[in-house]
Image: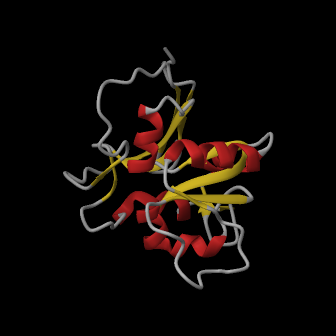
Amino acid sequence: MHAVVSLDGFIADDDDGVGPLFDWYFNGDRPLDHMGMSLSQASYDYTRPMWDSIGATIMGRHLFDLTNGWEAKAPAGEHLVVVSHRPKPAGWHPEADVPFFENVPDAVADASRRAGTGVVALCAGDVGGQALAAGLVDEVAMDVVPVVFGSGKRYFGPVDGQHLLDDPHAVIQGNRVLHLRYRVRKG
C-alpha cells in the first residue's frame, strides 16, 4: 500500500487537490519517468527500485475517475487493476486489458496473478484501507510531505479498528519528503 501523504494523514484535500504533496516529484535533478518527474538523488535511490519492483497496481474507482485511469497505464508496473461497483466506462481504452472488480480480495488475487514475481502496489485511500482491514497488505509505504491539510481524503480511508505495524525498515530523507516503509504485523 502506497501514497504520498500530509503530516496529518491526508492524500488529498476535501476537493481532491494534492497541493504541495507532489512537489518532491519535480524538485530534483534525477529524471524518474517520461512524465517529467525529476527527484533528488536520495528520493530517486529510494523510488526507482520500488517502482521497478511493481508488477501490478490496484486503484479504486474514485482515483480512476480523477485520473481517467492513468490512460490505462499505471505510473509503475505493467498491469493496472480497478476496484469499482460500477462497470468500466463504455469506450474507455477498448484496447487495454484493465479489469474491474467489485471487491478488493478479487482485485488482489487477479493483480497477484498478473504481477507474477513482482509486487502488487495498492493505492492508499478507501481501497487500501479495505485491503488493510482484510489482512491483504504486507507493507505500508508513505512519502510524508511537510504540510498539514487539516481535512481531506485519509491515507487509510475509513478503516475501522487498530492495526499494528512494525518499526519502519526504511527511513529516507529526500528534498521536502520523508520516505517511510513499515511491514504490517499479521495475526
- The furthest residue to the left: 150
Count of marks overlaid on the render: 0
* Relative vertical location of residue 19 with respect to residue 168 in this rendering, above or below: below
- The furthest residue to the top: 187
The quadrant in which residue 153 appears is bottom left
Name the foreground residue: 146 vs 64: 64
Across and down, in percent, residue 117 comes to 80, 39
Q: Residue at x 26, y 68 (%)?
A: 15
Across and down, in percent, residue 121 comes to 60, 46
The quadrant in which residue 120 appears is top right
> Is 89 situated left or right of 108 in this image?
left
Name the foreground residue: 20 vs 100: 100
Q: Is residue 105 visible?
A: yes
* Relative vertical location of residue 25 with respect to residue 49 in this rendering, above or below: below
Q: Residue at x 29, y 33 (%)?
A: 160
- The furthest residue to the right: 117
Across and down, in percent, residue 5 comes to 39, 48
Name the foreground residue: 53 vs 106: 106
